[in-house]
Amino acid sequence: MSAGMLKYYTDVLEPQFAKALFKESLDLFTSGERVWSSNYHWQGPLTKDTFPWYIRDYDKETADKILNALYDKGILTDREKEYDVMNYVGTRLSYIPWHNDFTWDEAVTIYLNEYWHEDWGGLFLYKDEHDSKEIMGYQPTFNTAVKQEQGETLGTWHTVTLVSVASQCPRVSIQIFPKERKNV
């Protein structure tokens, strides 16, 4: 029994738009503007001893442009569904512990770093069952999306590995969840 389904997509946004989103993320991150929250409000197993992930909501115009690109590519299909479209910045020594997104029926991550070396960590690892010993992974690649779709089960177990102190910049991505959660 598969616990969920992952799909990978390349070239999901217009490249100049993806580069502009990355630049905007870093500019805002270093500006001192108070536009970020952190992962410290997350619940349950996501609240372990990680350094901060910084999170902000995109403005409506930017969020709509991102969503329209995903609709045009067939990555998202329900134009009536409402989504939260967020910008995540993972700092050195941040990670996201093993979990599943069972309260949502889908989630999309788009990677924005033009270059990311595997020695810098921040890898997306996943497995079908929580107790499985078989772990698969994916290195963040510029303008590539990972979509998780949940079936009737609890979803794909996944983690983001620790961002190394050797990383030359933060790990920057877009995270998209439906506004409405599944009934569980």
Image: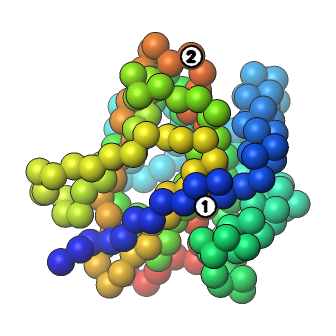
Q: Secondary structure at mark 1?
A: strand
Q: Amino acid at mark 2?
A: Gln
Closer-to-camera residue (97/175): 175
Q: What is the CA distance from the residue labelled 1 to the residue labelled 2?
A: 25 Å
Pointer 1 residue: 176
Task: Say whether marks 1 and 2 touch (CB < 8 Å).
Answer: no
Mark 1: give few (<14), some (14-19) or many (20+) Cα within 10 Å. Answer: many
Pointer 2 residue: 168
Q: Quadrant of the C terminus?
A: bottom left
Q: Quadrant of residue 50?
A: top left
Residue plotted at (50% across, 40% down): 140
Q: Quadrant of residue 62?
A: bottom right
Q: Is 103 displayed left or right of 36 in the figure?
A: left
Badge nearest the viewer, 1 or 2: 2
Q: Amino acid at mark 1?
A: Ile
Residue plotted at (88% across, 60% down): 61
Residue 86 shows up from this direction? yes
Q: Secondary structure at mark 2?
A: loop
Closer-to-camera residue (104/76): 76
